[in-house]
Amino acid sequence: MFEILKTPKYGLSFLMLTFFVYITAPIFEWLYLTNLLASGNLPPNADSIGLPFGLFVIVWIFFAPFVLCFVLWTLQKYPSQTSLFGFNQNHQLGSFVWSLIFGFLIFDCLALTFVNFSERYFIGAIQHLLLAYIFMIFRASIIFRKGEC
């Protein structure tokens, strides 16, 4: 009944979801910035939309190898059908630290989801909800690595 509260059964599903969100991020960022510019909240000059998008693309390209390595490391011992909210009693300190790290990222995604909803940018809200779900999968996959529990 609560299958959504567990990690996907196959690591390939996790991999495809992660890369879909990462690859489409510049498209959603551009749509958000053009939506923001059309709303009249930004002055209509090149710096108000070009600089934030340019910085986003540079950071997006810079972090691509790190994201790829992190995803591949996670998939090496991917635990299928593990609870997203579980806590590993065998590795309490590690579980706590990873929960804090990913808890901050998940909270940030949820806050951005509410911002996007308030700005009526629903595609961005869905993207941030998917990103929060991916972070929850990352957390569970690290805490409950196959063969290390």
Image (tube, rainbow, N blue to C red):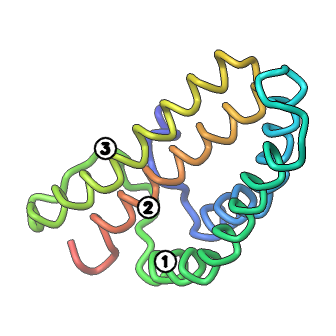
For label 3, the SS is loop
Amino acid type, callout 1: Phe
Mark drawn on residue 138: 2
Amino acid type, callout 3: Phe
Q: Is residue 16 left or right of residue 78?
A: right
Q: List the residue tagged with mark 3.
A: 85
Instruction: Kindly indicate whether the residue at mark 1 contacts the one at mark 2 (C-beta within 8 angstroms).
Output: yes
* 3, above or below 71, in the image: above
Measured in 3D between alpha carbons, the distance from the residue under mark 1 to the one under mark 3, in whole angstroms, is 20 Å
Q: List the residue tagged with mark 1.
A: 70
Callout in the foreground (2, 1): 1
Callout in the foreground (1, 3): 1
Q: Badge 3 local density, few (<14 within 10 Å), some, or many (20+)? A: few
Amino acid type, callout 2: Phe
Mark drawn on residue 57: none
Q: Position of residue 16 (x, y in %)?
A: 71, 64
